[in-house]
Image (cartoon, rainbow, N blue to C red):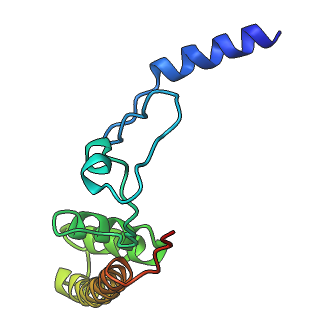
Amino acid sequence: MTGSGAQSTSRTSSRTVRLGSIRPQAPSYRSICCNDREANALVKFKGNSVSTTKYNILTFLPKGLFEQFRRVANLYFLTISILSFTPMSPVSPLTNVAPLSIVLLISLVKEAFEDWKRFQNDLSINNSLIDVLQG
């Protein structure tokens, strides 16, 4: 029974591919040379930097709008705004689109400010001094 479980695991792992991830090293022991930066630079271990930001410049608007329209109230007002463009609507589309746009703009500015603060916090953590044990 143990043999079949290991066999199915190897089949699953050979078919699983994660895009953008680093391939794992061969299953062996890692060796790190103390006080030899040149030798350790050749191994290319994964970095340990912290990143808690949600967005980057390219993904801010699409992800931000997606997050805003996940809220039921914003989705409801978007639907009402779209329906106000029909000829049967008794109100002007401006009366629905303007308040929704203002709310979305304020929410996106708040999200951008919070993400900028997260980015600054990440930079301060990643650039902070640490204690190194030598011996």
Q: Nearer the viewer, residue 20 or 109?
A: 20
The residue sitting at 52% across, 30% down in the picture is 28
Q: Quadrant of the N terminus?
A: top right
The residue most toward the right is 1
Q: Nearer the viewer, residue 74 or 6?
A: 6
Image quarter for residue 100? bottom left
Residue 88 seen in the current view: no
Which x, y percent locates residue 103?
Answer: 31, 88
The residue sitting at 23% across, 63% down in the picture is 59
Which x, y percent locates residue 57?
Answer: 17, 69
Q: Nearer the viewer, residue 112 or 61?
A: 112
Which x, y percent locates residue 117?
Answer: 33, 88
The residue sitting at 38% across, 84% down in the picture is 129
**Residue 129 higher or lower than 78, as above or below:** below
**Residue 30 higher or lower than 109, as above or below:** above
The residue most toward the front is 135
**Residue 115 higher or lower than 42, as above or below:** below
Image quarter for residue 80? bottom left
